[in-house]
Amino acid sequence: FGVDMVVVWPGQTGNQAGGRRAGEAIRLTEADTSILKATARRVRRVSPEVIRWGTNFQLGPRSFSGEVHGVMPEYQAIRNMVLKRGRFISQADVDEARRVVVIGGEIRQNLFSVRIALGERIRVRNADFNVIGEIEMKNQWSSYSGRDNKKAFIPFTTARAFLSRPFLNNFVFQPASAEQHGAAILEVRRGRTGRPREQELRTLESLFERDP
């Protein structure tokens, strides 16, 4: 999954949390991750994530259905993603909302066969994107959002407009150190209010375990 990584999803309020009705939906936005990045002392890296499943990738007559994920540059280090060729999303890509894409192994294999994809242009949901990186093919049995081999990654700002997603599917973060793992989770759960918010955010408990 990643190096000491935690995933946070939207959830709902608990029992009259903060004066709000119980069961009220809590949505995640880019502002939540920006606040964490600026104020959370026990969080080293954080990235918002927007996802579109069933995305069509095309190169000439060849096509493949996978996932497209909009992320920040920090995502690579959080997920410990190894590239076969090229590079991952950069801050310049995000700042300029570039149409660049990093593709997973199965996408590359289905569109390019044995050819190198780096530097080529593919269609993602009928829009042109330049391939800047290829992810190493993984023997992966599970992941929090699907197998990386079937994923493509684009700048978060590009995805926000391209996919018309005002809210996040989730965000991922990495504690400042392994020793501060639990404290970092508590700091994130406390959020803006400085008080624990029961059930407002769901975290995948199995991902609290640090990778060996």
Image (tube, helix red, strand yellow):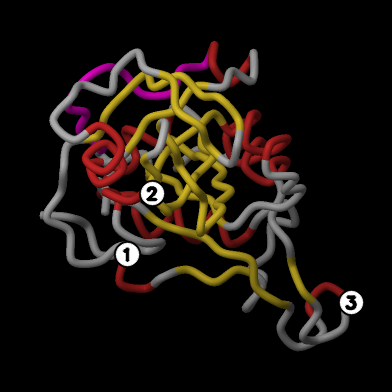
Q: Mark 2 = which residue? A: 64
In the displayed structure, 108 sits above or below 14; it is above
User: Does dot 3 land on a helix, a strand or a loop?
Assistant: helix
Type of residue at label 2? Phe
In space, the residues marked 2 and 1 are separated at their CA atoms by 29 Å
x and y percent of residue 90 in the render? 46, 17
- Residue at left offset 40%, top offset 32%: 59
Which is more foreground, mark 3 or mark 2? 2
Crowding at mark 1 (Cα within 10 Å: few <14, some 14-19, many 20+): some
- Residue at left offset 18%, top offset 35%: 113
If the image is split into quadrants, where does the C terminus sit?
A: bottom left
Snapshot quadrant of residue 153: top left
x and y percent of residue 148 in the render? 30, 50
Q: Mark 3 = which residue? A: 19
Q: Mark 1 = which residue? A: 207
User: Does dot 1 land on a helix, a strand or a loop?
Assistant: helix
User: Does dot 2 land on a helix, a strand or a loop?
Assistant: strand
Type of residue at label 3? Gly
Snapshot quadrant of residue 118: top left
Which of the two residues, 158 or 45, is positioned nearer the viewer here?
Answer: 158
Pick whichever of labels 2 and 1 is earlier in the sequence. Answer: 2
Instruction: Tell me which segment is drawn in magenta.
Output: 81-91
x and y percent of residue 141 in the render? 18, 66
Snapshot quadrant of residue 74: top left
Crowding at mark 2 (Cα within 10 Å: few <14, some 14-19, many 20+): some
x and y percent of residue 72 in the render? 51, 31
Pick whichever of labels 3 and 1 is earlier in the sequence. Answer: 3
The answer to whether residue 110 is left or right of residue 96 is left
